[in-house]
Image (cartoon, grey):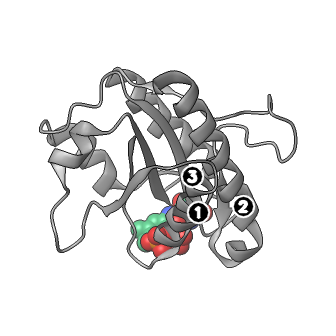
């Protein structure tokens, strides 16, 4: 099964969080996983993205919301068909009060508009609670690694349940 982790990352925090999620996914099964920075020098692999059963999307928090680069991608890139794919969202921020949950909620909201199925693991799987999806303050990212890894594992289990 193909899974993409799509994110915007200017200074590397969200990219690092994406790597933690990848660790979790790989800990739960055999997946073909690609990480893609939407502002990277190489363009997104739309062929791979369209073949994915699931797409996890990450953003740095900008003004208590998703980064505009991600919003632009949602609004303008019609080459990727997200409908019917399983989605999950994550974010990194500068401050605990800086709007991490709002940013994640807004990514999930966009996923719904695109026709995706969304999954957070919420609080239903016990500790650690994920609520809307894994988030971390950049300065605490390494200490928050387990949240992202756990999300990856639970997301992988859900993807296998739905698509295998
Ligand atoms: C333009 C801009 C706006 C930001 N706005 C917020 C904000 O509203 N709340 C917050 O907690 N952090 C804010 N930050 C901090 C980033 O969310 C944080 O540093 C994040 O981890 C950066 O991710 P990256 O290293 O993947 O680019 C902002 C950073 C930038 C550059």
Other-residue count near label 1 (Cα within 10 Å), few / some / many at <14 / 14–19 / ≥20:
some
- Residue 23 is tagged as 1
Q: Indicate which label's residue lies in the foreground, 2 or 1.
A: 1
| Percent of width and height locating residue 37 | 31, 64
- Expressed as whole percent of the image width and height from the top left, the position of residue 53 reads 37, 34
159 on left or right of 81: right
Q: How far separated are the C-alphas under marks 1 and 3? A: 6 Å
Mark 2 is surrounded, within 10 Å at the Cα level, by few (under 14), some (14 to 19) or many (20 or more) other residues, namely some
Secondary structure found at label 2: loop
Q: Is residue 62 visible?
A: no
C-beta proximity under 8 Å, tags 1 and 3: yes
Q: Tell me if the residue at label 2 has its CB under 8 Å from ligand 1.
A: yes
What residue is disc 3 on?
Answer: 25
Q: In the picture, residue 158 is in which quadrant?
A: top right
Q: In the displayed structure, would residue 90 be above or below residue 156?
A: below
Residue identified by numbered label 2? 96
| Secondary structure at numbered mark 3 | helix
């Amino acid at each position: 099964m193909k899974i993409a982790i799509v994110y915007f990352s200017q200074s590397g925090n969200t990219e690092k969080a994406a790597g933690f999620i990848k660790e979790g996914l790989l800990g739960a099964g055999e997946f073909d996983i690609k990480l893609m920075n939407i502002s990277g020098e190489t363009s997104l692999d739309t062929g791979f993205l369209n073949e994915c059963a699931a797409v996890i999307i990450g953003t740095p928090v900008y003004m208590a919301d998703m980064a505009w680069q991600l919003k632009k991608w949602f609004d303008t890139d019609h080459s990727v068909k997200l409908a019917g794919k399983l989605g999950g969202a994550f974010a990194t921020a500068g401050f605990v009060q800086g709007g991490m949950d709002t940013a994640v909620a807004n990514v999930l909201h966009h996923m719904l508009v695109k026709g995706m199925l969304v999954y957070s693991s919420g609080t239903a799987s016990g500790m650690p609670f994920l609520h809307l999806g894994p988030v971390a303050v950049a300065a605490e990212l390494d200490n928050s690694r387990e949240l992202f890894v756990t999300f990856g594992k639970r997301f992988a289990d859900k993807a296998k349940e739905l698509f295998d």
